[in-house]
Amino acid sequence: MGRLFDPSDGFDEDACLSMYDSSYDFYKLVLNTFLDDARRAKEGMEDTYSAGDIENYRIIVHGLKGAGGSVGAKQLVDLATRSNALIKDGEWDSAVKLHKPLIDELERLIKVIPERILAQNE
């Protein structure tokens, strides 16, 4: 079985396969679960951001660290880790600058994951 992701996709596929006993079938299940979570997180982030609900926004961002790690989404984990730390430190004005990059990364992942899974199934 070939690799799911191109190096330019930004996934640590090897680390995930190591966690999932080299099972692409299991990795695909985790990726599909992540997609559902990513869609909800994106919506939740947009809603809480618009409402100025900093604490619930931080909770969603914090969850993205683990969810992103479970699929090897390195850029998402990095952005979410930085945003979460800034919010915890009371630096909302700085964290706000990461909102659009986080949303953009979620949208990219929501697009690329199904494309790669479908391509491998062909």
Image: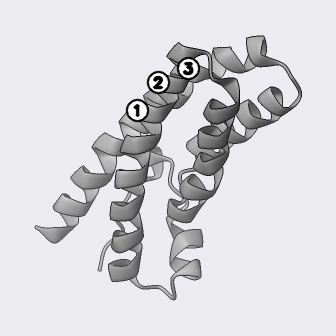
- Give the residue at mark 2: 46
Mark 1 — residue? 43
Q: Nearer the viewer, residue 33 or 16?
A: 33
- Element carrying mark 1: helix
Horizontal relation, residue 27 to residue 25: left or right: right
Q: Residue furthest top?
A: 93
User: Residue at point 23% right, 51% down?
Assistant: 115
Q: CA distance from mark 1 to mark 2?
A: 5 Å
Q: Are marks 1 and 2 in contact (CB under 8 Å)?
A: yes
Q: Are marks 3 and 2 in contact (CB under 8 Å)?
A: yes
Dot 1 or dot 3: first in sequence order is 1
Name which residue type carries label 3.
Tyr
Q: Amino acid at mark 2?
A: Glu
At x 18%, y 60%, the residue is: 119
| Circle 3 residue | 49
Of residue 121 and residue 103, the one placed in the foreground of this image is 103
Residue at the (55%, 53%) spot, across then down: 68
